[in-house]
Amino acid sequence: MRSSELPESVARNVAYWAARNADGYGARAAAQWARDEVTWGVFGVPDREVGALGDVRGLDVVELGCGTAYISAWFAKRGARPVGVDPTPAQLATARRLQAETGIEFPLLEAPAESVPLADASFDLAVSEYGASLWAVPERWVAEAARLLRPGGRLVFLTNSVLITLCLPDTGFALEELQRPQRSIRRLEWPGEDSVEYHPTHGEWIEVLRANGFEIEALHELYAPEEMRDAAYEDLVTGDWGRQWPAEDLWVARKR
């Protein structure tokens, strides 16, 4: 796919994330890089409790929408061979700085998940945690993941749950009442933010995955741990809400 054919959301989201990195989001990356265990989402659910990844030693891994690449850093610590892909130069600059500081090195590539200049069938595992899974056009980035994976390779990605997307007001934390119709959430532009998010429903995710040759192995709906009660997490959810309803969906699929 030529750059001229990229969706307009790519440029908007690059500008949005460049600003967020400058506003201090990148400062959090050092703490994320310092962690050794692979965890998922705003509640830091350990993968050992979920079982989405298994042993990644020796695997070729591509992280689509890697941001500051802390997920790839965790994979490198566990003996995988990651490649981080992201369209935002500021995010990748933070990742390169942390590579220099930690000595954890792996390739970083500036590219949108909708068009990745890497060879077909180069990877055993494709991963996205709130990267391509939230900010890239679903049909396009899933097709790229399928192209990049070897037969039998897995795609693991995390994004907001459908339910929390329906319960989020325009500002503030998720509520206990629906805030928007389900038909309206596939592409969302939040008031006051010049960015574009994509929130397919479960049925739409299944359709996209199957159309690109994936068999769905699991959908893990992630809740807050019981000990998390009154605290708020990110600008998204409170512990009380997250203990009752899933805040995030973690999908696992395998290329046929």
Image: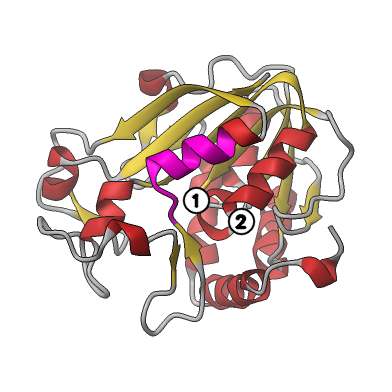
Please name whichever residue, 5 or 41, is drawn nearer the observer in this view of the structure: 5
Q: Main secondary structure of the magenta part?
A: helix
Please name whichever residue, 255 or 235, is drawn nearer the observer in this view of the structure: 255
Residue 35 in the figure: left or right of residue 164 = right
* Residue occupying image coordinates x 32% and y 48%: 162
* Residue occupying image coordinates x 60% and y 57%: 137
- Tell me where residue 48 appears, x and y as whole percent: 42, 19
201 falls in the magenta region: yes
23 falls in the magenta region: no
Does label 2 or label 1 sit earlier along the sequence? Answer: 2
- The single residue placed furthest to the bottom in the displayed view is 192
In the image, residue 115 sits, relative to residue 52, either above or below, namely below
- Tell me where residue 255 appears, x and y as whole percent: 67, 23
| Amino acid, disc 1 | Tyr
Residue 59 in the figure: left or right of residue 30 = right
- Tell me where residue 54 appears, x and y as whole percent: 53, 16
Which residue position holds label 2?
A: 67
Q: Which mark is residue 69?
A: none
- Tell me where residue 4 appears, x and y as whole percent: 83, 72
Q: Is residue 44 visible?
A: yes
User: Which portion, as a residue range, is magenta?
Assistant: 199-209
Which residue position holds label 1?
A: 130
Please name whichever residue, 121 or 100, is drawn nearer the observer in this view of the structure: 121
